[in-house]
C-alpha cells in the first residue's frame, strides 16, 4: 500500500491518521472544546505595552490576552514552511508603533500554553492550497522544500507572468510543485476574495472579536496533505464525506475519485491496524526493529530522549558498528515520534557512544534528513562535549499527550507513588505527631491495604511503643478505596471488626 489518509469521526472527537506503506507518518486529534485557534485572525485591542520585554498584550476575546512582539514585523516567518524570500520588499522594516487601547488585526501563531496567552503576529498570512497570501508584506518566496532548480525557475516565471500586485506578498507552498499557471491563479483569486471578506468583517465589528476562523482539522488535513501521491482518503462519516467532496471538487477536482466513504461495521482504525499504532504513541518506551529501544521523558521545558541497545539482535557486529546501527534507527524513529506526538521545545538526545567522528557525522546527517519531513521548524545544534545531541522543535500546537491526557490525580505528574514500605514509616511518623492532639482513647487508622499489611506484619513494635507512650489503643485498618499515600484517622472505631493480616 502507498500513502493513505484515514479520517475517523465520532460525536465529540475527530482523528486523522496518515499512513505510508502501513507506517504511521502523522496523527492528529481534535475535540470541540480543544479546537486549535492557530491561524485564526482577530480584531484585538492593545491592553498593555511592556518595553522591557519588547512586547504588547492584546485582548482578542480569549481567556488570556495574546502576546505580541513589537518586532514581529521583521521577525515574521510562516509556521509550517521554510522559504527563500526574494523581491524588493525584503528590506528590514521598523517595528509597529502601538498605543494602549489601539485596535489591531492579529493572527495566532502559537496556542496558549502553560497558563500563557496565545502568541500573536501582526503579519497576517492566509494559506491556500498552493499559495499563502500575505496582505501586509511586499515580497514573494518559494518553499525551500521545492529544491529542484528547474522547478523553482519555472514557478518564478509563472509568478512573473501573473503580474502580481506589489501591495501584497505571496509565498508558494510545496504542494505547488508541478502545478500550472491556471491552478496557481485560481488559488490566488480565492485568497484575495477571502481577504476582502476579512477586511470588511474587521471594519464592521468591534474589538475584541474573531474575524476569520481557520478550517477545522478535517479540511486542514485535506488542504495540506491530500496531494497527488495519496492513493486514498477514507472517511467514516457521511457528513464529513460530503464536506470533503465539496471542498475537493472546488479546489482539487482531479482528486475527487480518491475519496472513499468507509461503510464497514468494523471500526476503520481497528481494521487497518491504526488503533494499535496510536496507542504506542503514548508510551515512554519505543522499540526499534534492531532490538534496541528509545525512552522519551518530557518536562515542561525540556524533552529527554535516551537510546539503549536493549536486546540488539546483531551479535556478530563489532561494538562501533552495532552502536551506529542502533543510533541510525533511533534517529529516524525519534524524528517520527516528535512529529506524531507534536513534541516541542528543547530536545536532548543521548545516543549510544561512538568512537569515530565519521559515524557521528553520518548520524547527524541521518537525523537531519529524518527531520526534513517535519512541517514544524527544527534546529539541530550538534553534539555537545558530553556526547549529547541538542536540538529544538518549534512549538505551535499543544502536544498530542496534553490533548488526550490529564495529570494523574494520584501521583500529580511525578509518574511514581511511594512504596508500601515508605508509607508505613511515614504513617508511624504521622501518628506520632498527631496522637497528642486526639482526645479519644481508641484510635482507628485507615490505610491502603498494602500499607496496613506492612505495618501489622513488620511494624507492630513501633505501634506498641506509641500505644504505651500516648496511653491509647491503636487499630490499623485496611481500606481498599484509599490511595496508597492516604492516611485517615477515624474519630470513632468502625462497627465491623478491624482487619488484621
Image: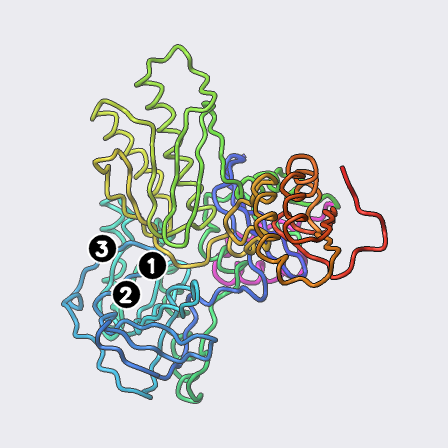
Assign the N terminus to one quadrant of the image.
top right
Q: Nearer the viewer, residue 230 or 28?
A: 28
Q: Who's the residue at 49% across and 30% down the image?
A: 287
Q: Who's the residue at 27% across and 45% down the image?
A: 147
CA distance separating discs 2 and 3: 19 Å
Q: Position of residue 158 (x, y in %)?
A: 27, 58
Instruction: Give above or below for 499 relative to 471.
Output: above
- Give the crowd class for mark 3: few <14, some 14-19, many >=20 residues within 10 Å: few
Does the magenta segment cover residue 262?
Answer: yes
Please name the residue that numbered disc 2 is placed on. Answer: 162
CA distance separating discs 1 and 3: 20 Å
Please name the residue that numbered disc 1 is placed on. Answer: 181
Q: Who's the residue at 41% across and 50% down the image?
A: 299
Q: Nearer the viewer, residue 293 or 242?
A: 293
Q: Are marks 2 and 1 in contact (CB under 8 Å)?
A: yes
Mark on residue 420? none
Q: Which numbered disc flags the more N-terminal residue, 1 or 3?
A: 3
Magenta-drawn segment: 237-264
User: SS of the residue at dot 1?
Assistant: helix
Please name the residue that numbered disc 3 is placed on. Answer: 84
Amino acid at each position: 500500500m502507498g500513502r493513505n489518509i484515514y479520517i475517523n469521526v465520532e460525536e465529540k472527537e475527530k482523528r486523522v491518521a496518515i499512513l505510508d506503506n502501513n507506517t504511521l507518518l502523522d496523527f492528529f486529534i481534535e475535540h470541540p472544546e480543544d479546537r486549535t485557534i492557530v491561524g485564526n485572525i482577530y480584531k484585538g485591542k492593545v491592553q498593555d505595552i511592556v518595553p522591557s520585554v519588547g512586547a504588547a498584550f492584546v485582548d482578542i476575546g480569549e481567556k488570556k490576552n495574546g502576546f505580541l512582539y513589537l518586532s514581529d514585523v521583521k521577525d515574521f516567518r510562516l509556521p509550517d514552511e521554510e522559504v527563500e524570500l526574494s523581491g524588493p520588499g525584503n528590506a528590514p522594516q521598523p517595528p509597529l508603533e502601538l498605543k494602549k487601547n489601539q485596535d489591531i488585526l492579529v493572527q495566532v501563531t502559537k496556542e496558549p500554553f502553560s497558563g500563557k496567552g496565545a502568541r500573536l503576529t501582526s503579519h497576517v498570512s492566509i494559506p491556500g492550497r498552493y499559495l499563502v497570501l500575505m496582505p501586509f508584506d511586499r515580497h514573494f518566496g518559494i518553499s525551500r522544500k521545492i529544491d529542484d532548480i528547474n522547478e523553482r525557475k519555472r514557478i518564478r516565471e509563472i509568478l512573473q507572468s501573473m503580474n502580481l500586485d506589489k501591495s501584497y506578498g505571496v509565498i508558494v507552498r510545496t504542494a505547488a510543485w508541478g502545478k500550472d499557471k491556471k491552478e496557481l491563479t485560481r488559488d490566488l483569486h480565492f485568497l484575495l476574495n477571502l481577504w476582502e471578506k476579512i477586511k470588511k468583517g474587521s471594519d464592521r465589528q468591534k474589538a475584541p472579536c474573531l474575524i476569520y476562523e481557520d478550517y477545522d482539522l478535517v479540511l486542514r488535513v485535506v488542504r495540506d496533505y491530500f496531494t497527488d501521491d495519496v492513493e486514498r482518503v477514507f472517511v467514516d462519516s457521511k457528513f464529513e464525506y460530503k464536506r470533503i467532496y465539496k471542498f475537493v471538487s472546488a479546489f482539487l477536482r482531479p482528486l475527487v475519485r480518491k475519496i472513499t466513504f468507509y461503510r464497514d461495521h468494523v471500526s476503520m482504525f481497528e481494521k487497518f491496524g491504526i488503533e494499535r499504532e496510536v496507542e504506542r504513541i503514548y508510551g515512554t518506551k519505543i522499540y526499534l526493529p534492531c532490538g534496541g529501544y528509545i525512552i522519551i521523558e518530557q518536562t515542561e521545558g525540556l524533552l529527554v530522549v535516551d537510546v539503549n541497545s536493549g536486546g540488539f539482535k546483531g551479535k556478530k557486529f563489532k561494538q562501533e558498528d552495532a552502536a551506529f546501527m542502533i543510533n541510525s534507527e533511533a534517529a529516524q524513529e525519534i524524528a517520527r515520534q516528535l512529529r506524531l506526538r507534536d513534541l516541542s521545545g528543547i530536545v536532548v538526545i543521548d545516543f549510544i557512544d561512538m568512537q569515530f567522528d565519521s559515524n557521528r557525522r553520518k548520524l547527524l546527517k541521518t537525523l537531519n534528513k529524518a527531520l526534513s519531513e517535519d512541517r514544524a521548524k527544527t534546529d539541530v545544534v550538534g553534539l555537545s562535549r558530553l556526547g549529547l545531541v541538542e536540538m529544538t522543535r518549534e512549538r505551535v500546537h499543544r502536544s498530542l499527550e496534553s490533548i488526550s491526557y490529564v495529570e494523574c490525580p494520584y501521583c500529580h505528574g511525578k509518574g511514581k507513588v511511594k512504596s508500601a514500605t515508605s508509607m508505613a514509616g511515614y504513617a508511624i511518623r504521622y501518628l506520632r505527631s498527631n496522637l497528642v492532639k486526639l482526645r479519644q482513647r481508641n484510635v482507628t487508622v485507615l490505610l491502603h491495604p498494602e500499607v496496613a499489611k506492612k505495618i501489622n506484619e513488620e511494624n507492630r513494635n513501633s505501634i506498641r511503643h506509641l500505644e504505651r507512650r500516648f496511653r491509647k489503643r491503636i487499630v490499623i485498618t485496611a481500606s481498599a478505596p484509599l490511595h496508597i499515600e492516604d492516611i485517615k484517622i477515624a474519630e470513632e472505631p468502625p462497627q465491623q471488626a478491624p482487619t488484621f493480616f
